[in-house]
Amino acid sequence: MTVVLRGGRVVDSGGERLIDVEIGDDGLIAAVGTGLTGDVQLDASGCVVSPGFVDLHVHLREPGQEDAETIQTGARGGALGGYTALVAMPNTDPVTDCAAVVEQVRALGSRSMCEIVPTAAMTVGRRGVDMAPMGELVDHGVGIFTDDGTGLQDPRLMRRIMEYSTGLTARLGRPVVLAQHCEVSTLSEGGFMHEGAWSSRLGIPGQPAEAEELMVMRDIALVRLTGARMHFQHLSTAASVAMVRGAKAAGLPVTSEATTHHFTLTDAACASYDPVFKVHPPLRTDVDVAAVRAGLADGTIDAIATDHAPHADHAKERPFDTAPPGMLGLETALSLSLEESGLDLPEVLALMSWRPAAIAGIADRHGVPIAPGAPANICVIDPDQTWTVSGRAMASLSSNTPYEGRTLRGRVRHTIRSGVPVVVDGEARR
């Protein structure tokens, strides 16, 4: 079966042009031009045709927490949001810290609507004590290691992991990426939102910005010492952004991401005491939000991620201090980025597609310019379509979106994964 995307405006890393796109039955782009015909024709008129999105930071919960999400349901939500690849975090149960769990995640992902890219923990059980068997995991294709959800507290162990990772480049065929959740736990412990004027007003114990910033500072110093490739996850403070900007200016091998909620919401949202606004790291101040947006604009921040973190209703409906942190993000990320990042559409697409694909080591098949012979991982965006957010209507098994009832502009019309239309006219096909 051949598929033609007709009448769209292609936007990729090579620029913009008005062309049709023909996709062959081999999963590759067969031709680009005008007047193309195929077995299936999908209307892209008035739409933007882009390489599919890549999310560097997704919690798919499987194995072990399937009441909140499964790989299948998470990938379905991803496809509806325009994603063709999701980088799965390792804080599963059991933790993804060995080859057996990596292969389990990969096998489950092979039947889903997105490519699932497993990460593995830096330390055994994410306990921050013993280094995970990184060499064995690299031999099983893992290229990103993270203890996400927990910052690695021991600087000596972090240095050892960094040094070891640099020696794995030849085995992997590309540099190993260490992705750090920056948080000094002795400073953040006992805090449930950002420490500042709003936490004082609400009587909710807070986490100081310095809990994030001290670890960013430490790891930049360790990158300078070891030469390891470091990716800073979900930057949320002005000082963190400034330090990463300085590290890049110094030529250090660092990259970073920001989540949609950290440039669209502030700690003032916690005034409702609704745990849907509890997230980790916490929502910050207006100054921090402005700094994150500036970092996206000037290239300090390389990718927009979601930190998609589903939780079953019974868990998220607890009191603010005992509810787990996290928000849904896959189906709202594009619209929020177009509306609130302050960037134009090509800049948003770069941050959601080809730049994160390069960090994830999958730029050979995702984020690729739309041209004959390229893998057909594509999304088609209607930038003018408006829709109303409903957690219950999302593909996730959970409904914890902080944007409930909000009307957004911009939505995915079609998603093509390896040449197969998995979303057509905004509806998932399987």
Image: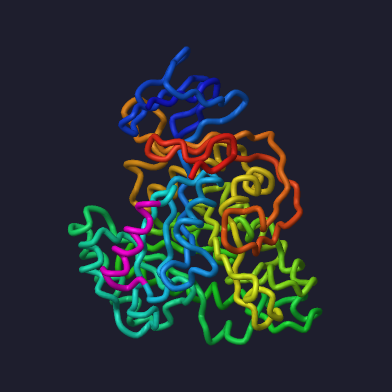
The correct choice, above or below, for 165 with respect to 107 in the image is below
Q: Viewed as shown, does residue 175 lie left or right of 197? A: left
Q: Residue at 24% x, 74% y: name it.
A: 133
Total numbered labels placed on residues in the image: 0
Q: Viewed as shown, does residue 416 lie left or right of 190? A: left
Quarter of the picture containing the N terminus is: top left
Q: Residue 190: which quarter of the image?
A: bottom right
The answer to whether residue 216 of the structure is visible from this angle is: no
Q: Residue 200: which quarter of the image?
A: bottom right
Viewer-side residue, 187 vs 65: 65
The answer to whether residue 37 of the structure is visible from this angle is: yes
Residue 112 at x, y percent in the picture:
42, 51
The answer to if 204 sits in the magenta stretch is: no
User: Most extreme residue toward the front, as rendered?
Assistant: 430
Q: Residue at 70% x, 41% y: name it.
A: 409
User: Most extreme residue toward the top, as rendered?
Assistant: 35
What span is in magenta?
96-111
Q: Residue at 46% x, 63% y: name it.
A: 232
Residue 425 at x, y percent in the picture:
58, 34
Residue 40 at x, y percent in the picture:
46, 24
The colouring scheme, among rainbow, by chain, secondary structure or one colour, is rainbow
Residue 53 at x, y percent in the picture:
48, 45
The correct choice, above or below, for 399 with respect to 423 in the image is below
The correct choice, above or below, for 145 with respect to 409 in the image is below
The answer to if 100 sits in the magenta stretch is: yes
Task: Identify the main secondary structure in magenta.
Answer: helix
Viewer-side residue, 375 vs 359: 375
Q: Residue at 41% x, 38% y: name it.
A: 377
